Amino acid sequence: MKNLVLIGCLVLIVGILVGCGKTETDTTSKLDNAVNGSSFLLASEPAGVVGVKAARESVQDNDEVVVVGRIGGGLNPWVDERAAFQIVDPSLLACSDDKEEGESCSCKTPWDYCCETDKLPTAMALVQFSDAGGNVIKQDARSLFNLAELQTVVVKGTAKRDDAGNLTIIADGLYVKK
């Protein structure tokens, strides 16, 4: 009987130790999945910058591009839990921008460009940051790059076009304008 109790206690102790212990592999794999956003940040604005509208009109699939835009274009311009967001050509006015006399527009989310919705389809692009394997990074762009709606950014990368003419920029560099 004593042996059974002793064996039972040993099995219980071993089970607790094995079940509750975190291995170095668990911690390492979580760290490996994290990306340092500073590796994408550019110290100065790259040359050859064009607006989103000009890029949509001229760039072909796989062209190298440098595009300037403001984060926005919808109620939620972010791709949740991904390093991706929408930008809008800087020529469009957000609802919070100064308007000409006699014009007024106000809304709770000025980054949705609710006063310019008719112009948005040809003035927007999606920006994505990818890992070494070509997959969109699984971290929120807001925290990865310390970004917010209506910030002006310059994105350097490769253009991807779809059949509908939409423009996605697979970014390898980001310059945040002050």
Image (spheres, rainbow, N blue to C red):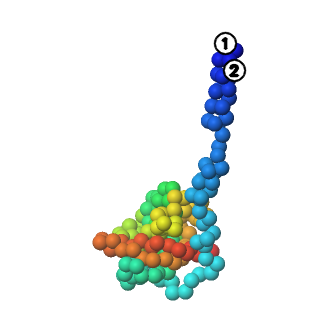
Residue occupying the far left of the picture: 163
- The number of callouts visible is 2
Examine the rendering and report whether any part of residue 76 can be seen: yes
Q: In which quarter of the image is the C terminus?
A: bottom right
Examine the rendering and report whether any part of residue 78 can be seen: no
Q: Residues within 10 Å of mark 1 (few under 14, many from 20)?
A: few
Q: Name the residue under label 2.
A: 6
Q: Mark 1 points at which residue?
A: 1
Amino acid on which disc 2 is placed: Leu
Which sits in the foreground, 104 or 161?
A: 161
Per the model, the C-alpha gap separating discs 2 and 1 is 9 Å
Badge number at residue 94? none
Q: Where is residue 111 in the image (x, y as percent from the top left)?
A: 49, 64
Which sits in the foreground, 75 or 19?
A: 19
Of the two numbered discs 2 and 1 on the same chain, state the one appearing first in sequence.
Answer: 1
**Residue 113, quarter of the rendered image:** bottom left
Q: Where is residue 94 in the image (x, y as percent from the top left)?
A: 48, 68
At mark 2, the secondary structure is helix
At mark 1, the secondary structure is loop
Q: In which quarter of the image is the N terminus?
A: top right
Residue at left offset 55%, top offset 86%: 47
